Image (spheres, coloured by chain):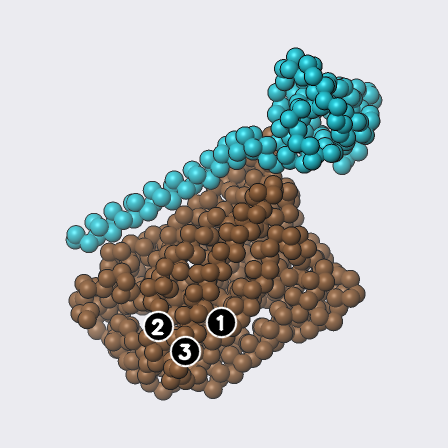
Amino acid sequence: MKEKKLNIKTAKKLIFICFSMFLFSFALIPLYNVICDVTGLNGNTSNLKEKVDSYTESVSSKKLNIQFISHQPNNKKLTFKPSEFEMEVSPGKIYSTMYLATNNTSSNIVGQAVPSVSPNEASKYLKKIECFCFEEQTFKPGEVTNLPLYFAIDEKMPKRIKTVTLSYSFFEIMNVSKKN
Amino acid sequence: MSSVVKDTHHDEHPSGIMRWITTTNHKDIGTLYLWFAMIMFFIGGLMALVIRSELFQPGLQFVDPQFFNSMTTMHALVMIFGVVMPAFTGLANWMIPIMIGGPDMALPRMNNWSFWIMPFAFSMLLSTLWMDGGAPAGGWTLYPPLSLQTGDAFPFLIFAIHFMGLSSIMGAINIVATILNMRAPGMTLMKMPLFVWTWLITAFLLIAVMPVLAGGVTMLLTDKFFGTSFFNAAGGGDPVMFQHIFWFFGHPEVYILILPSFGVVSAIIPTFARKPLFGYSSMVYATASIAFLSFIVWAHHMFTVGMPLAGEVFFMFATMLIAVPTGVKVFNWVTTMWKGAMTFETPMLFAIGFIVMFTIGGFSGLMLAITPADFQYHDTYFVVAHFHYVLVPGSIFAIMAACYFWLPKWTGNMYPETLGKIHFWLSTFFVNLTFFPMHFVGLAGMPRRIPDYSLQFADYNMIASIGAFGFGFAQLIFLYLIIKTIKGGSKATDQVWEGAEGLEWTLSSPPPYHSFSTPPVIK
């Protein structure tokens, strides 16, 4: 029965490959995130505060446009939009703008805004100094909330990029809002 | 099929239904797989006819859009996992042991298990048609968030996919173990028939990617029921991530569906051209290269998701590179036929039909590989035309060619040749009538997976629907022909075909229940 032993040995090796590939499918998630963070592909922007002082020293003379857009849940519960849709900015300078959120319901809405930058390439150079997207937001019934955003464009931003679009999608955190 | 084995030596096995349930014999299990694929072929075909009836004219006539979407989703799942994959596994079970001179499959009990999981998986999948919220309707690719909106059917769908995956993984492990360990002395790797080679490579692809699909759908399951956020942007996940995981499985999967066909065609063409296969070792290396390349091209299914330019360029060129080994194969088949003493029996007709029409599908694939052009073609009927050309006159024709080629060996009876030729010509005519017009409506902008369409697409859709019904009914000839051949017919010789070479043709027709208990001598 040498052959039978050999077959079982081969099968064990192959089952091991199967099992590692199953684990690999889960490893793809962190791998993918690491690749996106490192390269700025997929428009992922950093959700961390940037150091302020490094951007106040020199102001570049070139200008570029930055556009603000928003995506809200399509159930009309929340109105979520930028206070101004377009700004002309100089790299190296700190700017501030505002998003406005209105809770149209009679209960609290808890959620978080997720940013995305287009073109993807620009995401590395858009630095957020203070952003409402860093934390969860709670909107009381009927309340109009101002959501501040402070940002700067890195001077290293490639010259061919003339317009940057910053988008925020607001997602409700369902389980929490039900409890309230 | 009991007449097949009646008069052979030591065929002690339970009779009746228990024979099939408890069998560990590779020939019995091969037969079970093939019949399972046949039943699923007609179920999946019926779903295709529902789709084509609705699309016969613009407007909504027969089914509501939700059910229409269920039909496209279920048609794909049934045809891929229930027809092409089991049919090839069935052929592998039947042919691989007798092609390499082995007594049986390496792990016969697991073999029984891997077949008998399939009926349960598909009962589960098909039962969703009667569930609240309907059968899965988000497309066979299961993209979230749409697929997460499936109703009660969702967990059944996921577990059905888990079971199908388990079955094919076990089948693949068995095939690899058989090919590596059970070869007759003297049967070196480079002496193996190409069908065995293509299956060895296919089995490795299965082992590598089916667990990735299992992982991906498990994440969908936990996203829906256990509050994880793998693909949920609100929780920090990314729906595009699923597409990467899915196509990391999905692209090797399409080669799983086609590589064994290459093996079948490489067995049939030399037989009827009465010449040895041209470029045997280049065929082996071409198959291996296709398998390797299949792992680095997955994102060409996702050109429009917003990838960076560098990614699009890489995946475009990697995809186009696959045309080189595939071209080597087509070249070798044509060169094998060149100046051969060819005859055109039914298996040869199907094999030549395969080469011509698979190449058409290959060329439309090259068109889709060009990133800027793909932005226009993406999710149109052009894509539908492309993958149906490689799967129907590709994989399905190869399976039919294999059935005609080996049916006399399996049953001991010749099939009626004229009827076989009628089946081929009807199938070829109607398959082109169905899928060729889809190129035109696709280029003109008709989206896929849609139950209604603009008026300008009406004529071509009507032609395609007529073709689909013609093709569907032509397959009843195939069913009739197989049953008739099993029941009787003129006796086949051991070699069956004049130009046939290989160990399987040295056995009697039908072969004994247990063959090669003592290994054959390989020259």
Which residue is denoted by mark 3 in the rendering? B337
Q: Are marks 2 and 1 on the same chain?
A: yes
Residue B358 is situated, as x and y percent measured from the top left of the image, at 51, 68
Residue B344 figure quarter: bottom left
Cα–Cα span, label 1 and label 3: 14 Å
Cα–Cα span, label 3 and label 2: 9 Å
**Chain in cyan on the image:** A
Q: Colour of chain B?
A: brown
Q: Nearer the viewer, residue B423 or B498?
A: B498
Which one is closest to the eye, mark 2 or mark 1? 2
* Mark 3 residue type: Met
Which residue is denoted by mark 1 in the rendering? B354
* Mark 2 residue type: Leu
The chain that hosts pointer 1 is: B
Residue B49 is situated, as x and y percent measured from the top left of the image, at 63, 67
**Looking at the image, can residue B17 be seen?**
no
| Left or right relative to B46: residue B323 | left
Residue B486 figure quarter: bottom left
Sooner in the amino-acid sequence: mark 1 or mark 3: 3
* Mark 1 residue type: Phe
Which residue is denoted by mark 2 in the rendering? B277
